[in-house]
Image (spheres, grey):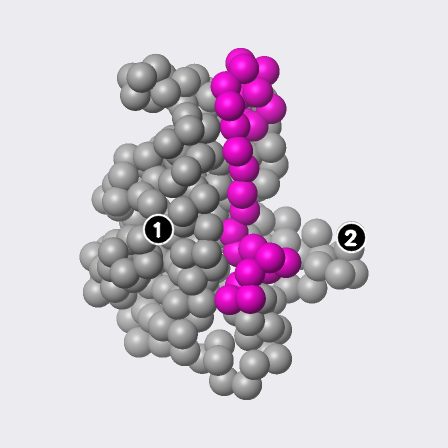
């Protein structure tokens, strides 16, 4: 069973995934975990990262080019994810294909100079869908969880993280406040449309991490029991 956790930089995805993982292990469910982009393990993700820090010429200017690199990162482990799923693991993913859809929609509406509407219906979201799932064979998640916070709070967390760790310099996407606001809305639109599979929205602005993790673990355990 593939469970993806989605949200902008600074939403708290890693914190929540860690808590959910611990809760599922406590319940003796088999768990695997992976985070995207895999900057340290994928040449495609590494090239995208270099682009985000302006080290690849005009690569970052290409919305479709960057989206393709991030999708190819997932394609590299698509068979592994499918095998783990077939073996009965609950696979927790910190970011997945929906991030590609959300950021691509946010970037293209920003470039078009249009006000964000229902970004889930933008043509680029359909293009990402076809690229990830049809062309590259990335497995579709069973449940997608939006770790939802305001763009302002997310930016504050990213800035605090950067101040505490000199190695955590903001990349081009993180530093763009307008892009982050658009991406927050894009994620919410995808969740409202239940893009590609069911979504659950978790308000993580000031939520109790343990309580949230227990609620999500309950939902996952129910899905596992129904699947069996």
Q: Which residues are magenta?
A: 20-45
Task: List x then y, in percent, for residue 212.
Answer: 51, 25
Residue that badge 1 annotates:
138
Quadrant of image for the N terminus: top left
Asked if one can make out residue 173 in the rendered structure from this viewpoint, the answer is no
Residue that badge 2 annotates:
164
Quadrant of image for the C terminus: top left
Return the disc, 2 or 1, that comes first in the chain's sequence: 1
Within 10 angstroms of label 1, few (less than 14), some, or many (20 or more) residues? many
Front residue of this view, candidates 154 and 81: 81
Front residue of this view, candidates 179 and 132: 132
Label 1 sits on a secondary structure element that is: loop
Task: List x then y, in percent, for residue 8.
Answer: 49, 51
Q: Quadrant of residue 116?
A: bottom left
Q: Is residue 124 above or below residue 190?
A: below
Closer mark to the observer between disc 2 and disc 1 = 1
Residue depicted at 40% across the width and 33% down the height: 85
């Amino acid at each position: 069973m593939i469970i993806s956790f989605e949200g902008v930089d600074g939403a708290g995805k890693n914190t929540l995934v860690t808590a959910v993982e611990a809760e599922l292990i406590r319940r003796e469910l088999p768990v695997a975990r992976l985070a995207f982009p895999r900057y340290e393990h994928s040449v495609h993700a590494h090239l995208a990262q270099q682009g985000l820090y302006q080290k690849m010429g005009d690569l970052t200017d290409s919305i479709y080019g960057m989206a393709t690199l991030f999708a190819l990162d997932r394609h590299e482990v698509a068979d592994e994810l499918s095998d783990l799923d077939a073996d009965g693991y609950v696979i927790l993913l910190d970011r997945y294909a929906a991030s590609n859809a959300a950021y691509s929609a946010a970037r293209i509406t920003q470039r078009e100079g249009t006000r964000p509407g229902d970004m889930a219906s933008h043509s680029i979201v359909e293009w990402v869908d076809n690229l990830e799932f049809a062309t590259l064979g990335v497995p579709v998640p069973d449940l997608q969880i939006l770790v939802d916070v305001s763009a302002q709070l997310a930016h504050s967390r990213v800035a605090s993280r950067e101040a505490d760790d000199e190695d955590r310099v903001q990349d081009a996407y993180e530093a763009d406040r307008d892009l982050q606001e658009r991406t927050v809305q894009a994620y919410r639109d995808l969740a409202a449309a239940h893009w590609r599979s069911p979504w659950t929205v978790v308000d993580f602005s000031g939520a109790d991490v343990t309580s949230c993790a227990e609620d999500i673990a309950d939902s996952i355990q129910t899905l596992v029991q129904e699947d069996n």
